[in-house]
């Protein structure tokens, strides 16, 4: 870091000063928040393993939800530069899984959706002006066009049905829209054959049932509506028959703080509940799960698409896009009654065909092909040949659960 706060490294005019591999093209990963960081983690390996390329990261200053993002990227070992510097540097390609401030980037931009596509409505801002229709999260017109020009060179979608939303919101962007599949779902599917390994890692190889409790962020999400539900599940479900793990949205981790989230649920961890890191582990849990108790977040939908029974612990129907995957899930999946005995509801959901909502066919139009299609688009934008070895959807790693503070300190 120089005295003016800018970084010196393998980018810009001075990129060769400390270079070991020279003549590299540079790819900028524009990270808007922790959620987009998790999606880019599935995409970055498609370019960062190429010894002709250097990958650099920056955090876009366009979201109120960026808390924790720079810390996470630094901890991963990435080269991270200030956004003001990134906006004054030319790159050969920029990749983003969010919108905002991309018009300031000097590179062809590939823009991805994060989550299960255009499924949730953005929050209406508070203010004195009259109300207007809320935007679709991740698909705002003002994030796609600026200054009379479409910002992304490629706008990637998982399913052909998503183009209908784009046509309503920003028809000028249709020429750059591409159907590239869903890299997160492809990795989940690639992990399903290793179900037994994941179940062993979660400690349920003995025949216990694994219940994944998933919460998105916000006051109407599962944890926002029922903050003590996980503890009650841990008390009501016999530990010799059930194991519970929590998958909490990255925004909850970033906004409230990693330390605070662990402290809030330390009593649950001491009851045997497992807490998954925000950046990885949720797909391993879904691959091993017998039931997902969730809400309108993407993890619940991915679980349903993978064939896991679903029980909805919260579902604000007015926060989802009508006709979307989330809307379909909310209308078809059974709903949990938190104030009734929980064990019979869990047992019924696992046994009932009604708790299995077939969503796979509407999640991606290109199952298993996201790595191939996304890499093709990225190398096409850079104007160079792809590596000879075809990319594949890699199974996710075995999970690493977060333990209680008492266990970490060595106390009994």
Image (tube, helix red, strand yellow):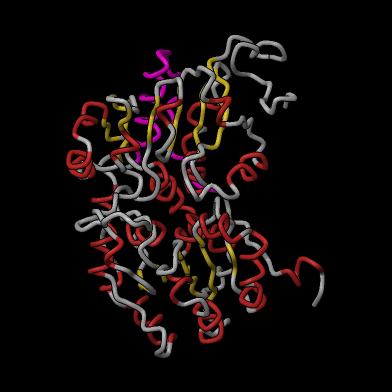
Q: Residue at x 43, y 54 (%)?
A: 192
The correct choice, above or below, for 151 with respect to 308 in the image is above
- Quarter of the figure with residue 78: top right
- Work out whether residue 292 can be spotted: no
The correct choice, above or below, for 360 with respect to 146 in the image is below
The C terminus sits in image quarter: bottom right
Magenta-drawn stretch contains 121: no
- Work out whether residue 144 can be spotted: yes
Q: Residue at x 24, y 55 (%)?
A: 324
Residue 387 as seen in the image, left or right of residue 55 = left
The N terminus sits in image quarter: top right
Q: Position of residue 86 (x, y in %)?
A: 55, 25
Observer-nearest residue: 149 or 277? 149
Q: Position of residue 363 (x, y in %)?
A: 29, 50
Observer-nearest residue: 13 or 130? 130
- Quarter of the figure with residue 376: top left
Q: Residue at x 43, y 18 (%)?
A: 386
Q: Position of residue 58 (x, y in %)?
A: 56, 33
Q: Residue at x 41, y 58 (%)?
A: 299
Observer-nearest residue: 96 or 346? 96
Residue 326 as seen in the image, left or right of residue 163 = right
- Quarter of the figure with residue 314: bottom left
Residue span colored magenta:
368-396
Q: Position of residue 128 (x, y in %)?
A: 34, 57
Magenta-drawn stretch contains 388: yes
Number of disc labels: 0
Residue 187 as seen in the image, left or right of residue 275 = left
Residue 81 as seen in the image, left or right of residue 329 = right
Residue reaching furthest to the right: 410
């Amino acid at each position: 870091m120089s005295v003016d706060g800018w970084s010196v490294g393998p980018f810009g005019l001075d990129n060769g000063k400390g270079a070991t591999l020279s003549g590299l093209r540079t790819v900028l990963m524009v990270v808007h928040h922790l959620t987009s960081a998790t999606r880019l983690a599935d995409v970055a390996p498609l370019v960062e393993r190429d010894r002709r390329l250097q990958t650099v990261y920056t955090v876009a200053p366009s979201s109120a939800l960026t808390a924790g993002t720079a810390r996470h990227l630094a901890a991963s070992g990435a080269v991270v530069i200030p956004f003001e510097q990134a906006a004054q540097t030319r790159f050969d390609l920029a990749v983003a899984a969010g919108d905002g401030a991309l018009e300031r980037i000097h590179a062809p931009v590939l823009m991805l959706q994060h989550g299960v596509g255009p499924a949730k409505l953005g929050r209406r801002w508070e203010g004195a002006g009259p109300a207007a229709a809320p935007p679709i999260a991740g698909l705002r017109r003002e994030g796609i066009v600026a200054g009379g020009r479409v910002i992304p060179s490629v706008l990637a979608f998982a399913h052909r049905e998503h183009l209908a939303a784009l046509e309503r919101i920003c028809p000028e962007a249709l020429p750059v829209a591409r159907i590239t599949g869903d890299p997160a779902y492809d990795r989940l599917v690639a992990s399903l054959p290793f179900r037994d390994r994941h179940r062993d890692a979660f400690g349920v190889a003995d025949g216990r049932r694994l219940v994944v409790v998933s919460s998105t962020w916000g006051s109407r999400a599962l944890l926002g509506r029922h903050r003590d539900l996980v503890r009650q599940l841990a008390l009501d479900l016999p530990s010799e028959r059930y194991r519970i793990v929590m998958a909490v949205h990255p925004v909850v981790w970033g906004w409230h703080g990693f330390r605070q989230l662990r402290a809030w649920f330390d009593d649950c961890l001491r009851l045997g509940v497992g807490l998954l890191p925000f950046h990885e582990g949720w797909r391993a849990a879904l691959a091993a799960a017998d039931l997902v108790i969730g809400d309108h977040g993407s993890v619940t939908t991915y679980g349903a698409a993978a064939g896991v029974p679903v029980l909805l612990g919260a579902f604000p129907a007015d926060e989802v896009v009508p006709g979307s995957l989330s809307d379909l899930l909310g209308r078809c999946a059974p709903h949990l009654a938190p104030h009734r005995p929980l064990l019979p509801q869990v047992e019924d959901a696992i046994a009932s065909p009604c708790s299995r909502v077939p969503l796979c066919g509407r999640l991606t139009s290109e199952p298993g092909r996201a790595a191939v299609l996304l890499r093709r688009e990225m190398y096409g934008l850079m104007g160079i040949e792809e590596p000879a070895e075809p990319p594949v959807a890699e199974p996710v790693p075995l999970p690493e659960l977060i333990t209680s503070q008492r266990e970490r300190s060595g106390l009994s």
